[in-house]
């Protein structure tokens, strides 16, 4: 991509300058059209009103019940309330109602095109505007739209509230049934599983399990001790005869002893279970302790009675002493205690197993209880919200105020908003400038003519011998000095003679110097031509000849253009006889060659022949050129353009070379290319290029005067010195 620094903006400026007339016309046309449109446009008035949009109160209700989220949405639920209200205001229904009340003969769509609704930043306010050519109509339209919208908003609000109330009334019985079912499920669960307070029950169960384990260990230890004591007593009674043993055994089988023992074991078991439930100071435990002491005393008494009875009945055992009787009594008491402890350990183990089983199922019971409680709580919460919202909706249903409120009513505008004369004129000027530049650049883009010195040099590729400034700025003065003669416009082209102190004269002097230093041997005869007509080859020939003559050289200017001769007009000479007459032998050189200035002679073209090329390529013409080169210091032959005839290439074989004249803006690239190819194909000796009618006011062109047109380095330095002097 081309970088910015490589863009030649000067070329664009030059293109605009070349097309300044068309650019000016385009600019004036656009400005005129803009002004006419502005003046002819009808004034447009705009009225504005403002409406406040409040957030919807509670017509639509979301119900949040902790983990159970339910959405009870009403008709009025909106994700973008302001955007929805804007679309509602701009609806066809409101437009039709407004048109009907205003009695406007306008289509709803046209009404909406004039209506605009916008949201003010950082506020819940809508700005409603209407444009019309009549200020009263604009204000009335805005106010009517606002009134219709506010009435519609209240009606819609009431309808939404009524719809919500009906929805809640349908939901209440269902939610009430859900609450009752949830409460019944919880109650049945607690009854089926004997649940009072699971947390407290868990704490008590853990404590009871610890107490039972401790009691079992204590009872087992006591049982082991009793069994050991029984072993010792049986060993001491080993010398007792069988009758004594029978009597001792019979005492343990006594009904009275057995009943007392059973009652004692029963009370011990009840006491063990009670201690797992009640504290030690509880009345229940104290009552059981008293019964235990009573039964223990009763048991000892009956054992003693049984032992004494046996001793009386069995006379053979009277020899037993009181010590043995005491041992037997202790044996019976220990046996009774062993039986009680064994029964106690068994009972405590069963109770411990029941507690552990209950503790294992407590987490599951707790989880299920919590689920049932949450269901009940959610159902109750939803039901309570419905009841509360029902009361709120009943209040909202009786309100006469909607979500919208009038803030500012539209007033009749005093000034129109359009047309903006200043803005339109500024925009017209800007648009005119842009279009003018665009037109100039486009025309220049499609223009195939050579426009600049740079383009001419790059296209031809010949040595640049001179840059001749445009003499049009001097043309009026010269023509005025020459009067109104027919040929005055041609005579005015001799700038070297008429304005010797102007830059054009200096340019011809430089051209003369460059020809002098073109090669080691200065050319004596040259042909001057151009690619197309109107490039100024004849003017260049005349002024160059005069510049040569001013340096005290004898110069002959030959007009060999026998199709459209100009030299006689430039020098104000008669063309009744000339070159053509000399070539056909009807005139002599002494009578046809005219002295126009000191050291300068001109040979006009003469009568235009039917076939000029035959005359120019004749031996007579070659002889004349040779004779002219011997008699004069410098000979310049003015020939037709290359696009007209091949006269210049024919004559160039008779002279030292061709001097090609090019004029930017006149010659196009195609013609220039054709001319160059023709010169190359015919093997012409092109001495160099002269670019005519350049713009001396442009630095891009004027820089060539000092640096870019000399053919060799030595000539370049000398031309610079001349220019500096």
Image (spheres, rainbow, N blue to C red):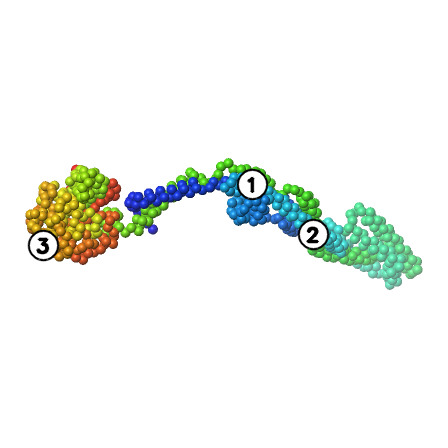
Foreground residue, 634 or 538?
A: 538
- Alpha-carbon span between mark 2 and mark 3: 128 Å
Residue at screen point 18% across, 38% down: 481
Query: In the image, is 282 to the left or to the right of 705?
Result: right
Q: Position of residue 527 (x, y in %)?
A: 14, 50
Check the image and report above or below for 699 versus 225: above
State the CA–CA distance, disc 3 to disc 1.
99 Å
The residue depicted at 19 percent of the width and 40 percent of the height is 484
Residues packed near mark 2 inside 10 Å, few (<14), some (14 to 19) or many (20 plus): some
Q: Is residue 71 visible?
A: yes
**Mark 2 lies on residue:** 171
Residue behind mark 1: 140
Mark 3, secondary structure of its residue: loop
* SS of the residue under disc 1: helix
The answer to which of 230 and 206 lies nearer the viewer is 206
Split into 4 quadrants, where in the image is the C terminus? top left
Task: First in sequence, mark 3 or 1: give its number.
Answer: 1
Q: Tell me which label, 2 or 1, sits earlier in the chain.
A: 1
- Counting from the top left corner in percent of width and height, residue 262 is at 85, 57
Residue denoted by label 3 = 584
Q: Position of residue 509 (x, y in %)?
A: 15, 42
Label 2 sits on a secondary structure element that is helix
Give coordinates of residue 629: x percent, y percent: 8, 49
Q: Residue at x 87, y 60 (%)?
A: 253
Disc number lying in front (2 or 3):
3
Q: Is residue 598 above or below residue 368?
A: above
N-term mark: 2 or 3: 2
* Residue 701 horizontal side relative to residue 373, left or right: left
């Amino acid at each position: 991509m081309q970088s910015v620094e490589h863009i030649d903006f000067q070329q664009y400026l030059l293109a605009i300058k070349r097309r300044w007339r068309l650019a000016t016309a385009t600019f004036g046309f656009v400005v005129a059209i803009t002004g006419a449109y502005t003046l002819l446009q009808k004034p447009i008035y705009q009225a504005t009103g403002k409406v406040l949009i409040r957030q919807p109160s509670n017509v639509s209700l979301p119900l949040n019940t902790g983990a159970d989220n339910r959405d009870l949405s009403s008709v009025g639920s909106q994700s973008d309330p302001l955007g929805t209200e804007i679309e509602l205001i701009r609806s066809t229904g409101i437009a039709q109602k407004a048109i009907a009340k205003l009695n406007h003969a306008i289509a709803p769509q046209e009404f909406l095109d004039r209506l605009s609704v916008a949201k003010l930043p950082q506020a819940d306010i809508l700005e409603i505007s209407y444009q019309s050519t009549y200020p009263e109509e604009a204000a009335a339209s805005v106010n009517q739209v606002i009134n219709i919208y506010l009435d519609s908003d209240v009606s819609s609000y009431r309808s939404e509230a009524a719809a919500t109330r009906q929805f809640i009334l349908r939901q209440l019985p269902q939610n009430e049934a859900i609450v009752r079912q949830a409460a019944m499920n919880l109650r049945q669960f607690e009854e089926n599983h004997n649940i009072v307070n699971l947390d407290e029950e868990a704490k008590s169960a853990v404590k009871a399990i610890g107490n039972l384990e401790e009691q079992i260990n204590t009872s087992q230890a006591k049982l082991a001790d009793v069994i050991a004591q029984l072993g010792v007593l049986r060993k001491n009674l080993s010398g007792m005869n069988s009758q004594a043993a029978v009597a001792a055994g019979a005492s343990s089988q006594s009904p009275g002893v057995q009943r007392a023992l059973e009652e004692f074991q029963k009370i011990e078991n009840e006491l063990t279970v009670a201690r797992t439930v009640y504290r030690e100071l509880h009345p229940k435990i104290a009552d059981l302790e008293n019964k235990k002491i009573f039964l223990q005393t009763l048991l000892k008494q009956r054992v003693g009675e049984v032992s004494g009875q046996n001793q009386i009945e069995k006379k053979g055992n009277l020899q037993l002493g009181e010590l043995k009787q005491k041992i037997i009594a202790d044996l019976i008491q220990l046996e009774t205690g062993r039986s009680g402890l064994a029964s106690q350990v068994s009972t405590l183990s069963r109770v411990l197993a029941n507690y552990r089983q209950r503790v294992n199922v407590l987490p599951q019971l707790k989880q299920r209880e919590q689920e049932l409680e949450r269901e009940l709580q959610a159902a109750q919460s939803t039901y309570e919200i419905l009841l509360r919202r029902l009361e709120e909706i009943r209040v909202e249903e009786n309100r006469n105020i909607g979500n919208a409120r009038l803030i500012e009513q539209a007033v009749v505008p005093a000034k129109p908003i359009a047309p903006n004369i200043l803005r339109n004129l500024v925009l017209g000027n800007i648009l005119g400038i842009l279009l003018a530049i665009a037109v100039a650049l486009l025309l220049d883009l499609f223009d195939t003519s050579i426009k600049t010195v740079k383009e001419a040099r790059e296209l031809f590729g010949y040595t640049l011998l001179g840059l001749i400034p445009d003499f049009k700025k001097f043309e009026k003065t010269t023509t005025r000095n020459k009067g109104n003669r027919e040929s005055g416009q041609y005579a005015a082209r001799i700038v070297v003679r008429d304005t010797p102190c102007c830059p054009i004269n200096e340019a011809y002097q430089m051209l003369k110097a460059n020809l002098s230093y073109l090669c080691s041997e200065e050319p004596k005869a040259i042909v001057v031509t151009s690619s197309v007509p109107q490039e100024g080859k004849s003017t260049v020939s005349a002024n160059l000849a005069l510049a040569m003559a001013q340096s005290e050289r004898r110069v002959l200017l030959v007009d060999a253009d026998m199709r459209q001769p100009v030299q006689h007009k430039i020098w104000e000479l008669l063309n009744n006889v000339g070159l053509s007459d000399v070539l056909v032998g009807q005139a002599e050189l002494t009578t046809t060659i005219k002295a126009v200035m000191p050291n300068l002679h001109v040979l006009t073209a003469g009568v235009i022949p039917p076939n000029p090329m035959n005359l120019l390529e004749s031996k007579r013409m070659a002889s004349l050129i040779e004779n002219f080169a011997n008699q004069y210091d410098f000979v310049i032959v003015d020939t037709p353009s290359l696009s007209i005839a091949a006269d210049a290439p024919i004559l160039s074989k008779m002279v030292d070379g061709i001097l090609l004249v090019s004029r930017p803006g006149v010659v196009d690239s195609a013609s220039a290319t054709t001319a160059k190819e023709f010169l190359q194909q015919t093997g012409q000796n092109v001495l160099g290029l002269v670019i005519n009618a350049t713009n001396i006011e442009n630095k891009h062109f004027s820089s060539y005067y000092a640096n870019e047109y000399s053919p060799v380095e030595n000539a370049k330095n000398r031309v610079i010195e001349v220019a500096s002097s």
